[in-house]
Image: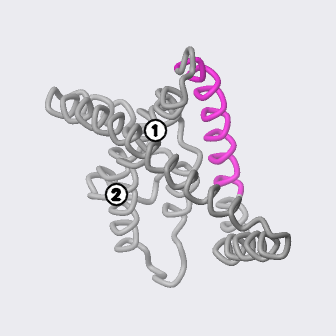
Amino acid sequence: MLNIIWLALIVSSIVVAAITGRMEVVNQAAFAGAKTGVTVCFGLLSVLAFWMGIMRIAEKAGLMELVARALSPVISLLFPDIPKGHPAMAYILSNMSANLLGLGNAATPMGLKAMEELQKLNPNKQQASPAMCTLLAINTASITLIPTTMIAIRMQYGSVNPVDIVGTTLLSSFAATIVAILIDRWYRYRAIRSIR
């Protein structure tokens, strides 16, 4: 659906530009946008590479295992239907650890692997399991301690203090995660009540 909306916006802008005789403005905007996109991507690549390196060092030093161990009781409460020691738990813990550090791009492969493992536990392969829904809700909201991507974008555009957003990002992502968990639990409760 989103692709259709974007296509409609692009086609309508080209048609309006052709009718009004302003195609050169559309061409200039398209090339300027492409140039900006490449510039921002290069800035993000350097920050992502830096944080991936920090994450690798943290992993080798045992920090990621420490974070995973600290999160383990919370994860067990959030995902009671996943057996202890199942590979899905390790992927979920890695995914959440990466999200905490604002590395959404690094968290995505781990989240996908967690979903694969959760699908193996799913008795109804045509429908998402409650654990899959919980992971999706938490991953979408995800508490972020260090919003590395936003800091990188703010640096790219010359912000005087790119880390100004850390406090508000932490507060808003914490609130979003709490709401996501509450809604997830409400839907789980409704599903259990409808079965009885």
Q: Position of residue 11 (x, y in %)?
A: 72, 76
Considering the numbered disc 2 on the image, is that residue within a helix, a strand or a loop? helix
Observer-nearest of 58 and 30:
30
What is the CA distance from the residue labelled 1 to the residue labelled 2? 22 Å
Q: Is residue 4 left or right of residue 63?
A: right
- In the picture as drawn, the residue positioned furthest to the top comes out as 160
The magenta stretch is 163-186
**Residue 99: which quarter of the image?**
top left
Badge 1 crowding class, 10 Å Cα cut-off, few under 14, some 14 to 19, many 20 or more, is: few
Q: Identify residue type, mark 2.
A: Pro
| Residue drawn at the location 76% of the way across and 69% of the way down | 13
In the image, which is nearer the foreground, mark 1 or mark 2?
Answer: 2
- In the picture as drawn, the residue positioned furthest to the right comes out as 20
Q: Is residue 134 left or right of residue 120?
A: right
Q: Is residue 76 left or right of residue 138?
A: left
**Residue 15: which quarter of the image?**
bottom right
The answer to whether the residues at label 1 and label 2 have Cβ atoms under 8 Å apart is no
**Is residue 108 inside the magenta stretch?**
no
Residue position marked by numbered label 1 in the rendering:
74
Q: Position of residue 127 (x, y in %)?
A: 54, 79
Residue position marked by numbered label 2 in the rendering:
109
Question: Could you tell me what secondary structure mostly forms the magenta stretch?
Answer: helix
Which part of the image, by quadrant, shows the N terminus? bottom right
| Residue drawn at the location 62% of the way across and 56% of the way down | 28
Q: Position of residue 90 (x, y in %)?
A: 29, 50
In the depicted structure, whether residue 75 falls above or below residue 112: above
First of labels 1, 2 by sequence position: 1
